[in-house]
Amino acid sequence: MAPDRELIKFVMDYYTMRAEKYGVLNGLAQSRRVFFITGYVPENAAPKLEKLLQEKYEVVVEYTEPGDEEDVPILLHNNKFAEPVEGVIESYSVPSKGEIDPSMIVALFYYVQFGLMLSDAAYGLIMVAGTAYCLTKFKNMEAGMKKFMKMFMYCGISTTFWGFMFGSFSEMLSMLSRPHSSTGRISGSLLSGLSQ
């Protein structure tokens, strides 16, 4: 049984997906040659979708504005500065219809706070170089990963800025390289006091 475990998992996944597919198809209003489907599409993407559908199929497309009581999906749309933190917003909860999109405010505070906490120019430059390399080298990167890389690039820029402002350049490395740091003396004296 153990050697066939992966095959059994594959077969289970296959039939689960097929069951879900036919569950969706059974929920459609359809006849032998016609079916009816509804969904949501951003207003600016509607003409492109309609054109694509009409080129490939015989279809009638009708658009209506969602009602006030409908729970519509939310699509965040921000500039290049705020777009990378959309994942952070989505990990908590996207704003509901009619609420303000907090992405710009979150982006500003996220980048500044990250830079203030790390505030080391060397680490910031390493972050900027590493993320810039990944963004230019791997052009076909998944959209979520691309946003993640851009977010850390902006965090690296902030870290570099605050590192220069505080005069900190690879400070942690220099602290670790000192043989007799104050933390070592404190922990040493605490340990000797406990052993008595």
Image: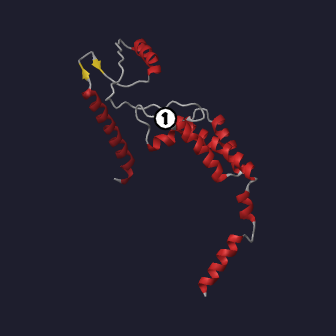
Relative to 155, 122 lies left or right = right
Say whether residue 124 is left or right of residue 93: right
Give the tally of numbered discs. Answer: 1
Residue ID at (28%, 27%): 25
Does 182 sit above or below residue 8? below
The kind of residue on which mark 1 rests is: Asp
Q: What is the secondary structure assignment of the residue under circle 1?
A: loop
Q: Which residue is mark 1?
A: 101
> Percent x, y for residue 18?
31, 34
In the picture, measured across the screen, residue 34 lies left or right of residue 6, that is left
Q: Tell me if residue 177 comes above or below residue 76 in the rendering.
A: below
Give x and y (percent) for residue 184. Answer: 69, 72
* Residue 152 occupies quadrant: top right
Q: Who is closer to the viewer here, 108 or 33?
A: 108
Residue at 28% from the left image edge and 35% from the top image edge: 19
Residue 139 at x, y percent in the picture? 61, 32
